[in-house]
Every structure is written in C-alpha cells, then in structure tokens.
Amino acid sequence: MRKKAAAAAAGGGGDVLREHWLVRDMFSFENVGFTRDVGNVKFLVCADCEAGPIGWHCLDDKDSFYVALDRVAHE
C-alpha cells in the first residue's frame, strides 16, 4: 500500500507495510469505508475522515480484509 502524497513526494517510493491483521468478516469493522476498485483491489479508509489507506481487500477473495498494523491504533 502507498499513500498518494507520500508516493509523489518520494518519487513513487511509498511505504512498505508488511504486517497486517486478517479480518474475515467485513461487518467486524465499525467505521471503515472502501475505495473504488483499483484493478482487483479495494483500499480500506477511515469512514469519518477518509484517512488512509489503512488496509486493502482483494476482490478475488471475498472473505479476506487486511488491515495494516502501522496505520491503525490498537491496544
């Protein structure tokens, strides 16, 4: 996943995020929105402030949603 502003400023470098949570049910999310399709991927964003991406979802696997650990606060 890459942030649009960061990728442009770094010449397309972006962030490399390797650790993700796997969420099997999209109804587990309380306030997450989805972007339009980008190829066969939808990116997850905060539904309140549209910050993100905080994760991604491959349209080939309807039951797999990945949330980047570095993009969310967790306890």
Image: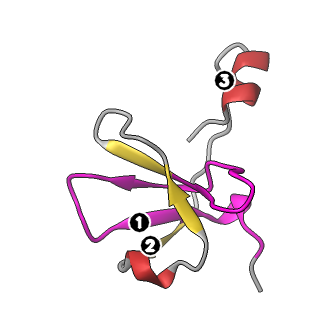
Alpha carbon separation for disc pair 2 and 1? 6 Å
User: Above or below — where is 48 with respect to 36?
Assistant: below
From the image, tell me which residue sits under label 2: 22
Looking at the image, is mark 3 or mark 1 earlier in the sequence? 3
Verify CB contact (< 8 Å) between mark 3 and mark 1. Answer: no
| Residue beneath the point at 28% across and 40% down | 40
Residue type at mark 2 is Leu
From the image, tell me which residue sits under label 1: 65
User: Above or below — where is 39 with respect to 23?
Assistant: above
Q: Nearer the viewer, residue 4 or 36?
A: 36
Q: Residues within 10 Å of mark 3 (few under 14, many from 20)?
A: few
Determine the secondary structure under disc 2.
strand
Alpha carbon separation for disc pair 3 and 1? 24 Å
User: Above or below — where is 49 with respect to 3?
Assistant: below
Residue 19, x across and y down, in percent: 58, 62
Looking at the image, is mark 3 or mark 2 earlier in the sequence? 3
Highlighted range, magenta: 44-73
Residue 18, x across and y down, in percent: 57, 54
Verify CB contact (< 8 Å) between mark 2 and mark 1. Answer: yes
Which residue is the extreme one toward the top? Answer: 11
Q: Residues within 10 Å of mark 2 (few under 14, many from 20)?
A: some
Residue 61, x across and y down, in percent: 23, 61
Instruction: Judge whether residue 65 is colored magenta.
Output: yes
User: In screen coordinates, is 75 left or right of 26?
Assistant: right
| Residue beneath the point at 36% across and 40% down | 37
From the image, tell me which residue sits under label 3: 13
User: In screen coordinates, is 64 left or right of 44?
Assistant: left
Determine the secondary structure under disc 1.
strand
Residue type at mark 3 is Gly
